[in-house]
Amino acid sequence: MGIISAIGRTPEEHLSSLVQAKSGLRKLQHIESIYNNKIPVGEINSSNEQLAKDLTLPEDHNYTRTAILGCLAAKHAIRDAGLLTSNLKNDALISATTVGGMDMTERYFKEFGSNPEVQKYIDSHEAGDSTHKIAQQLGIEGFVTTISTACSSGANALMLAARLIRSGMAERVIAGGTDALSKFTVNGFNSLMILSGEACKPFDRHRDGLNLGEAAAYLVLESETAANRRGARIRAWLSGYGNANDSHHQTASSPEGDGAFLAMNAALKSSGLQATQIDYVNAHGTATPNNDLSESKALLRIFGDAIPPFSSTKPFTGHTLAAAGAVEAVFSILALENGVVLPNLNYKEPIRETGLQPATVCIPNVMQHVLSNSFGFGGNCTTLILSKS
């Protein structure tokens, strides 16, 4: 697996930040916005130019920040898996994004008609452009597709990868998501009145909104046969997955968490596990009044009075949109490997309606199964279950 976010550039750096409770949230700096130095975001502290050098791109490239982050994380995942790009020609790639290339097209929109030098970014606007660039960087010529289901996109990419492998249509799939910060998303979420001016407080009674972030994370999924054939290190199993739609509202979750409940239930059913076998829940936990209450009610419906330790890791990275499901799959695997429940920062008081209390410090816990939730606008809800290898 490979990952880049506001708290690190490798899985090891992320683990260090998570266990030491070091948040990556800070005031917005790297995009021109009326909110510069005003709102906290999970921003990667490198310019596009610096990141392009890390990828050794030519000066006349038309890679957007979304594409650059995705390429860096996917290449790291390949190295972590002990693979070479020369081995990937017939493999599959599933990449998730919502922002696509708009970080550059919004920057140069007013110049496209008069400045030929920036017109190259018009072609990099659509969501599939970053996917194709990742495929080119990895030398993949097999099945390549893009998923954009809002904030469940990254989790859906992993679910589709597992289904391709289970059906025999692929032996190995590189799957994950990438999204960069942009004025469009900052202004859009602000117009919905769900951005917080402070560090977010998931599952806290006084939560008042989310913080946006940027990140990319990719995982190499293989069939057991293919992994054993090459003597691969198996970090974890994607043992269950489920997707459902609560059909409630364009942006809000249903009051009783119907979509979340259905997704978690479907993931448990596909894994063959009982709810009592889940050792930790990496919650979606956006710190919005609606999501956290809805998800809390869904957790109660699934687990009853025996809810396992749970937490949201979004106070570390911000909400990374399409990348979130893949980012948090990486976090779930790190939790499994290191036997630790990750902390939910900034929590003080329980939500009055449910009384649930997330883990606020790292808790040593021998774990076999972690459940990870990702819920998107439009009611698209996805749950993954990661299991110890």
Image (cartoon, rainbow, N blue to C red):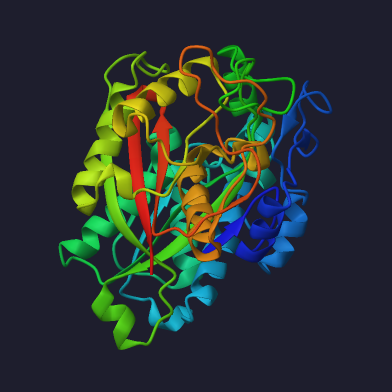
Tally the marks.
Answer: 0
Looking at the image, which is closer to me, 4 or 263?
A: 263
Residue placed at 65% from the left, 57% from the top? Answer: 14
Q: Eyeballing the image, is 310 above or below 297?
A: below
The quarter of the picture where residue 176 lies is bottom left
Q: Eyeballing the image, is 337 above or below 118?
A: below
As drawn, is 144 to the left or to the right of 127? left
Q: Is residue 97 visible?
A: no
As drawn, is 169 to the left or to the right of 325? left
Q: Eyeballing the image, is 306 above or below 323?
A: above
- Give the residue furthest to the front: 305
Q: Quadrant of the C terminus?
A: bottom left
Q: Eyeballing the image, is 118 above or below 133?
A: above
Q: Is residue 244 visible?
A: yes
Residue placed at 28% from the left, 35% from the top? Answer: 263
The quarter of the picture where residue 175 lies is bottom left
- Residue 222 % position (x, y): 32, 70
Residue placed at 63% from the left, 30% from the top? Answer: 109
- Residue 129 % position (x, y): 47, 50
As drawn, is 60 to the left or to the right of 219? right
- Residue 140 % position (x, y): 39, 70
The quarter of the picture where residue 114 lies is top right
- Give the residue furthest to the right: 37
- Give the residue furthest to the left: 167
- Residue 228 % position (x, y): 31, 83
